[in-house]
Image (cartoon, rainbow, N blue to C red):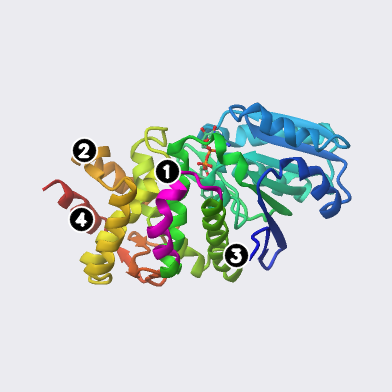
Amino acid sequence: MKKTKLFIKTKSKIYPIYFGSNLLNKTGKIIESQLPGVKKICIITDNKLPKHLLKKTITSLKKYEITLFKLPAQEKTKSLKIANKIIEKLLKNNFNRSDCIIAFGGGIFGDLSAFVSSLTKRGLKFVNIPTTLLAQVDASIGGKTGINTKQGKNLIGTFYQPDFILSDVSTLKSLPQRELISGYGEILKHSLIYDKKFFLWLSKNGKKILYKKNKNYLVNAIFKSCIIKSKIVSKDEKEKDLRMILNFGHTFAHGFEGAKNFSKKLNHGEAVLLGMIIASELSKQKKLLSEKDLLSIKKHYYNLNLLFNIKKIFKKGDIKKIINFMKRDKKNTSDKINLILLKKIGKTTNPKQVSLRDLEIRNFLNSYYN
Ligand SMILES: NC(=O)c1ccc[n+]([C@@H]2O[C@H](COP(=O)([O-])OP(=O)(O)OC[C@H]3O[C@@H](n4cnc5c(N)ncnc54)[C@H](O)[C@@H]3O)[C@@H](O)[C@H]2O)c1
């Protein structure tokens, strides 16, 4: 199968992801055919991206009036203050609903740009060009927008689907290894929650993806990952039920990131990797997951040298802070903490099936330090 296009079908919109290599110089052509009414384009991008990437994109957009925002890739950028500044500029430049915003960067830029697109004049056209592996396999798909506050990450947001996504594997050439691993965490998650065959394929080929950046294997993994996320999102766009299984490992991850004050000491994907192995071990302790499946997952972590040791990152004294952040997770509906656990590789517990008291989770985390 030639992996060049995939349609994401949600209730609010059906839109394509274009996959391939060296696609940036086609951005203008695709906009011309998909969004013929566009006259003005606002690009919201990462000020640290290699210059040639932006240059290629802008060159292909010659016929449009361009407004450019270059911002730092840090969580602080996902703020109401910055969103407001961009919206004011768009209004001043007379952007209307047929004009377009392009997110060009990692998940930070996708989340911010989608938020701004959804609010300005009740919705501008929106194109996402993700340049990290994490954004290509996860953040760009599904329509969640996100703004951070002092109370926590992504606590403000809307659902807003893009008009299309351009997923260009060649943008990953310059991506640091740590960011590649971070994206791999989400690929692995998709296999663990939905597709054992994909997990077995990753177990065989993970090294080629992570340590050789083999383009064909990368495109395969990205494509497969997008299919899984899109299937889930298509069935439950607004996260009422099924979509919650995508939170496997993420409730712990949220606690870990919070305990590190959402700093670069532990990035999102690293926190997810650690969260998934801990959630797998908890699944085994709860007699949901077999020893055999847990061992296969652990073997995968060892073979690929993925982060699995909580003691490397946190002291026992940090656990209270981790739990406090887990309790604040917006997916909790009671005092208890909702968790998605594994029944077997490829199958999770049902959403809302497992909710644990904070004391139980605290004891479980403490047990790593005994
Ligand atoms: N909306 C969603 O469904 C969703 C899902 C997962 C994560 N997220 C959000 O995504 C964000 C994390 O995403 P991310 O890891 O992509 O973040 P990011 O935008 O911070 O990028 C990570 C790092 O990679 C660098 N980078 C980006 N592209 C590069 C390239 N091509 N070459 C070299 N360096 C490059 C950036 O400068 C940055 O240092 C978080 O804010 C998280 O909340 C959203």
Indicate the secondary structure of the residue bearing disc 2.
Answer: loop
Residue 52: x and y in percent read 68, 29
The tag on residue 315 is 2
The tag on residue 162 is none
Q: Amino acid at mark 2?
A: Lys
Q: Earlier in the sequence, mark 4 or mark 1?
A: 1
Indicate the secondary structure of the residue bearing disc 3.
Answer: loop
| Residue behind mark 1 | 211
Q: Amino acid at mark 4?
A: Phe
Q: Alpha-carbon distance for marks 4 and 1? A: 33 Å
Indicate the secondary structure of the residue bearing disc 4.
Answer: helix
Q: Is residue 83 above or below residue 161?
A: above
Is most of the magenta stretch helix, strand or loop? helix
Q: Earlier in the sequence, mark 3 or mark 4?
A: 3
Q: Amino acid at mark 1?
A: Tyr
Q: Earlier in the sequence, mark 3 or mark 2?
A: 3
At x 27%, y 57%, the residue is 298
Q: Is residue 72 above or below residue 362?
A: above
| Residue behind mark 4 | 364
| Residue 211 is a magenta residue | yes
Q: Which residues are magenta?
A: 198-215
Q: Alpha-carbon distance for marks 2 and 4? A: 14 Å
Q: Nearer the viewer, mark 4 or mark 1?
A: 1
Q: Alpha-carbon distance for marks 3 and 1? A: 34 Å
Q: Amino acid at mark 3?
A: Glu
| Residue behind mark 3 | 237
Q: Earlier in the sequence, mark 2 or mark 4?
A: 2
